[in-house]
Image: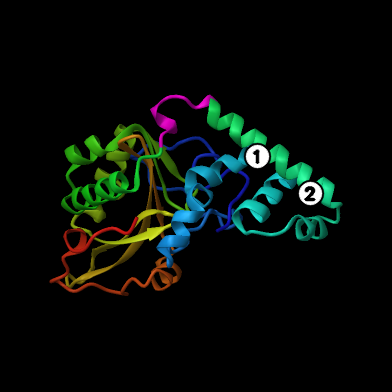
């Protein structure tokens, strides 16, 4: 999992209008990348620390505190190991970690509305299955019911992201209209449901990889969708096939990991 200073989607620039084609890929940015959940028990233990919302919040920490938090709380380094990496004392490393934890705790305490609520695993799985089915049908009405009014859609590595139902609909019905008729296969990434999206093949036979969609939740709605376009790298990593034939059931077969 990598990140730039601003997270995966909303801090590189302002949101884009949905009807506008994406800006060119930004190869200079280190994006938050999806990690497959190969061990459900480990994913449950890791919890918030691998989810997109947590990683995006790291932007509010100075670099040294951010590194200390990731090394200690996510990767499990000892205080001495962190101190050696930073060329500092153990006391200094512990101090940076404590300040980082305090800052993030204060931010969580200030978020008291439904946007701060992470739904239970069962709710996330149901929402993800409904989303995948609605996307495969290209049912804009159903998608509108599932997405939060301020939901975001981002497209790494393109420096483009959208906020709000109207712009997301405009994107899907405009520049992304070729996604109509897609099939989605369930998987899990960063402790949250995800899907491998396959678009209809240009030659009309089967479906070809298009994006790995990772979903973020808030309350009883979907708060964000990050569609990673580097399918050559991510689909093998997640065990997703390199093509689907005409009989593929897509979102209607199987269940999401959670």
In percent of width and height, residue 213 lies at: 36, 55
Q: Nearer the viewer, residue 139 or 217?
A: 217
- Relative to 36, residue 126 above or below: above
Q: Which mark is residue 93?
A: 2
The relative height of residue 245 versus residue 229 in the rendered view (above or below) is: below
Query: What residue range appears in magenta?
Result: 110-117
Compute the Cα span from label 1 to label 2: 12 Å
- Residue 112 magenta-drawn? yes
Q: Residues within 10 Å of mark 1 (few under 14, many from 20)?
A: some
Which residue sits at x=67%, y=55%? 71
Residue at figure coordinates x 43%, y 66% from the top left: 39
Badge 2 local density, few (<14 within 10 Å), some, or many (20+)?
many
- Secondary structure under the numbered disc 1 in the rendered image: helix
Where residue 157 appears, as percent x and y from the top left, is 49, 55
In the picture, measured across the screen, residue 85 lies left or right of residue 215, that is: right
Count of numbered badges drawn on the protein: 2
Q: Is residue 42 left or right of residue 100?
A: left
At horizontal 77% and vertical 61% (from top left) the residue drawn is: 81
Q: Where residue 257 appears, x then y in whole percent?
A: 32, 59
Residue 105 appears in the rendering:
yes
Q: Residue 31's image quarter? A: bottom right
Q: Say if the magenta span includes residue 198.
A: no
* Placement of the C terminus among the 4 image quadrants: bottom left
Q: Which of marks 1 and 2 is nearer the N terminus?
A: 2
Question: Looking at the image, which is closer to me, 160 or 59?
Answer: 59
Task: Please tell me which residue is depicted at 20% across the width and 72% down the height of the picture.
Answer: 203
Identify the residue position indicated by label 1 in the image.
Answer: 101
Pick the quarter of the image with the N terminus.
bottom right
Between residue 101 and residue 31, name the one nearer to us: 101
On screen, 97 above or below 116? Answer: below
Colour logic:
rainbow
């Amino acid at each position: 999992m990598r990140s730039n200073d601003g997270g995966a989607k909303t801090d590189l620039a302002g949101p884009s209008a949905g009807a506008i084609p994406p800006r060119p890929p930004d190869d200079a940015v280190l994006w938050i990348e999806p990690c497959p959940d190969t061990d459900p028990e480990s994913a449950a233990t890791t919890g918030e620390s691998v989810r997109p919302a947590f990683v995006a919040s790291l932007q509010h920490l100075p670099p040294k505190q951010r590194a200390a938090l990731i090394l200690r709380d996510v990767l499990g380094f000892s205080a001495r190991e962190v101190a050696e990496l930073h060329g500092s004392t153990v006391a200094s490393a512990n101090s940076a970690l404590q300040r980082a934890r305090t800052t993030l705790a204060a931010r969580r305490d200030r978020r008291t509305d439904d946007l701060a609520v992470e739904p239970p695993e069962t709710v996330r799985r149901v929402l993800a299955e409904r989303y995948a089915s609605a996307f495969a049908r290209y049912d804009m009405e159903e998608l509108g019911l599932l997405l939060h009014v301020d939901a975001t859609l981002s497209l790494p590595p393109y420096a483009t992201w959208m906020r709000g139902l109207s712009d997301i609909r405009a994107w899907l019905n405009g520049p992304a209209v070729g996604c109509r008729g897609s099939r989605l296969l369930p998987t899990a990434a960063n402790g949250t449901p995800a899907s491998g999206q396959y678009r209809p093949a240009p030659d009309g036979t089967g479906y070809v990889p298009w994006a790995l969609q990772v979903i973020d939740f808030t309350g009883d709605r979907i708060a964000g969708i990050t569609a990673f376009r580097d399918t050559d790298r991510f689909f093998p990593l997640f065990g997703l096939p390199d093509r689907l034939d005409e009989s593929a059931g897509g979102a209607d077969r199987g269940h999401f990991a959670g």
